[in-house]
Amino acid sequence: MGFDNKNSYWIDTFIKKYEESFKKVDLHDRKSEYWRFASPSIWYDVYNNNKLPLEKQIENFSFNYDDITDCCIKFKDGMLDISSLAKLNRGEKNIEVSSYKDAVTNENHWSTQKFGVAQLNAEKPYERPLALFNGLDSRDGVFIKFKKGVRKKFHIIYEGNEQKKSTIRNLFDFEENVDITIIEHFYGNSKYNIVSEFFSHNNSKFEHIKIINQDITDTFIYHLFGDCQKHSNIKAINFSFSENPVRNEVNLHLEGPECDATVASLGFGQKDTSICDNTVFISHQEESSKSRQIIKNALSGGAKAIFQGKIYVSSVAQKTDGYQMSNGLILTDDCQFLVKPELEIYADDVVCSHGSISGTLNDDHLFYLQSRGIPLAEAQKHLIQAFFAEILNEINDEKVINHIEKQISIKLA
Amino acid sequence: MFEIQNLHVNISEVDKKIIDGINLKINPGEVHAIMGPNGSGKSTLSYTLSGKDGYEVINGDIKLDDESILELEADERAAKGIFLAFQYPIEIPGVGNLSFMRTALNSQRKYNGNNELNPAEFLKVLKDKANNLNIDMEMLKRPLNVGFSGGEKKRNEILQMALLEPRFCVLDETDSGLDVDAMKQVSNGVNSLRSDNRSFLIITHYQRLLNYIKPDFVHIMAKGKIIKTAGPELAIEVEEHGYSHLLT
């Protein structure tokens, strides 16, 4: 198998490698530590779902794109809208944007030096079979090089209408001193499998926000693999409102010293079909880097949330500061919040901590609000919104915050 | 008028009777103080009046303007005009003080058939109240009670009282944890809200608060009952001699 059956390209080596590795994987094998709570087959097999009409999707859940002045790239049913790319390349001098197709069929493309590198670094400690599948199956995506010093905000919008697969491969390269925000929005009738690799060079700042809207009708899995050089400042924030299985895999390799990495996730599930799985691995390879993992899930109606978070500190990564906290707000008795925190530390001068709290709404908080005339249902909504406030405080974009608050309100209605 | 008739209350969790037959009538404009030793049931009384779960009325009644409030939830009692100023106001991270107060006011207005205030209207009302109480609006930009000092928490309670304009206010050990200056400030706030249409039930251990908020009546509570009622001089008597001579 290659990119196509006519010609050979540099990408074919990778496709063949991923295909060979994928063949050896048993998707129903639950022995792997990182798949014990949810089998990889969930995100591979055909999934029974409730298809929503497209017009209902856009009416209820859509972000207001009308007054966006930032850059915008669109995917429909797994295929890149080339016109959105063409508009981008005309206007932007400090950014090189290519489609997956154009990049992988060009032997001189910059991505030949980067493709697959971050994914390879993430292969330990466990296999990522759905990332392997993405590697052999993806035929579209976007590869963007951000040149030195550029500051930019991007929206990437993925729409699904025809109940097809959206197996997409992205690659982002950040040169020194950039300040980039990428906000990815996911909608509709599609089985999403996304792999995004990024490389942040010295002093670069990257904020990555994913919004998985509640009209997604199939399973969703996203792998974010990042290699970070000195003084990189990385934020990976995930918002999941889908009532179907979602797996958010984040693997950050802090290769340079004095990096600052935050991974945060907000999940809101209200049905027994909802699985919100965050599997996060942050590896400190040099000294004086900081990392934070903050996971919050509100669950009702039989929903399930999973958090597997690891902080790895190599022997030379002295003065590491690593923090991990997961909170589960369990609103009905039939929900599960499954947590497996890990610290693997080989340096001896570090500060690392992990904690997890699960519980229901605080009765004293509820009574305080009610004693001021706020009815019980309204008081519960306030407290659920308050529960998520810590994650919302991680982002600065007012439109995104308003959209997230609207999604939470729709769920609470 | 607020009336407690032969009230008997169990704490459900431990199935123990704490209030053992209380009768009390508080007319509009009156200030009543309840004092008593620890464990006498004072806080149980305040939670029962405000409708907190876990406090089961097994006999008797509580009436506001001759109508029983026992079937009303806590938010309904508040909307009818009952306000509890907590001894330990709880911190609620993530809930903005300002948005909480607006929601509270509008919830009560809605319950009583009045139009809700928009943000600008609300802010104007709140600023007036805060200015009258010498409360800094900066405090309102913070999460509800989070990181507030003891005095700030109590002042926030008084501001809520001023905003919601209740008809019957229960102050549960409002002086608890306050230094003299903070206590004076809180007392001034309470006194500024005294009117012919508003009555107060002040629960306190110490007579000193009653130097600043002068009561019309003082009741001594012990073992779930009111054992003595008199004028303000009773508080001074307790300050000088303690409770023991009243308990025998």
Image (cartoon, rainbow, N blue to C red):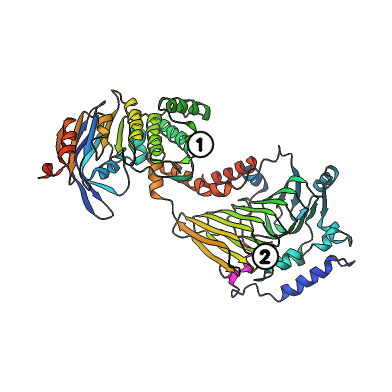
Residue at 59%, 75% in the rendered image: A31
Q: Magenta stretch?
A: A30-53
Chain bearing mark 2: A
Give the amino acid at mark 1: Lys
Q: How many marks?
A: 2
- Residue A18 located left or right of residue A398: right
Residue with the mark numbered 2: A285
Q: Position of residue A35 (x, y in %)?
A: 60, 69
Q: Which of A369/A356 is in front?
A: A356
Residue at 26%, 48% in the rendered image: B56
Q: CA distance from mark 1 to mark 2?
A: 41 Å
Q: Is residue A40 magenta?
A: yes
Chain bearing mark 1: B
* Eye-nearest disc, 1 or 2: 2
Q: Position of residue A236 (x, y in %)?
A: 65, 54
Element class at badge 2: loop
- Residue B72 located left or right of residue A183: left
* The N terminus of chain A lies in quadrant: bottom right
The vertical placement of B199 against A329, above or below, is above
Q: Is residue B44 magenta?
A: no
